[in-house]
Amino acid sequence: MIGNKVHDLRIKKHLTQTELSKILHVSQQTITKWENGKAEPSSSALAKISDYFNVSADYLLGKPEKNKSTVTDADLENMLDNAKSFDGKPMDDHDRELIRAYLKGLYENK
C-alpha cells in the first residue's frame, strides 16, 4: 500500500526513482523496493516522504483520517488532475491553476 502511494505521488511530481532517492537521501534501489512492496520505509523515511509530498503518514499508511476537515495539497492535486471540464466547458491548465489558487485561498482563510 505504501509503495503504491509513493509511486503515485512520485509520478504526479514527474520524478524518477533516482531523483526521489536523492531528495530523500536513500538509494534508488530502496525506492524500487518500496514501490514493489518488497520493503517498507522506516519511520524516519516515512516522515521525509510525508514532508516532501505534503501528505500525512496516515495517508501513506492507508489509514482513514478521522474527522478529516482539511484538504491536503495532494487531495487538491487529485481533484484538479481529474477535472477535465467545469460546467460542461473544457478546462485547460490555466483554468486549473486559477481554481487551485482560489481553493487554497478559501482553505487558508478558515
Image (spheres, rainbow, N blue to C red):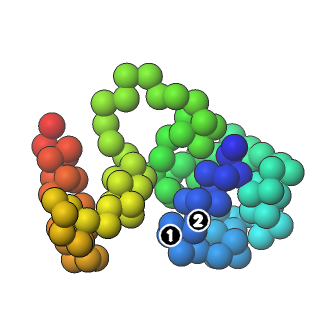
Depicted 106 relative to depicted 63: above or below: below
Distance from the alpha carbon under mark 2 to that under mark 1: 5 Å
Left or right for 59, reference 81:
right
User: SS of the residue at dot 1?
Assistant: loop
Name which residue type carries label 1: Lys
Disc marking residue 102: none
Q: Residue at x 31, y 36 (%)?
A: 70
Q: Position of residue 29 (x, y in %)?
A: 83, 67
Local packing at callout 1 (Cα closer than 10 Å; few below 14, some 14-19, many 20+) is few
Q: Residue at x 55, y 59 (%)?
A: 9
Name which residue type carries label 2: Arg
- Looking at this rendering, what residue extends furthest in the right direction? 38
Q: Residue at x 77, y 70 (%)?
A: 28
Residue denoted by label 2: 10
Residue denoted by label 1: 13
Local packing at callout 2 (Cα closer than 10 Å; few below 14, some 14-19, many 20+) is some
Q: State the count of labels.
A: 2
Q: Position of residue 110 (x, y in %)?
A: 15, 37
- Looking at this rendering, what residue extends furthest in the front direction? 88
Left or right for 72, reference 89:
right
Tell me, yes or no, if residue 73 can be seen here. Answer: no
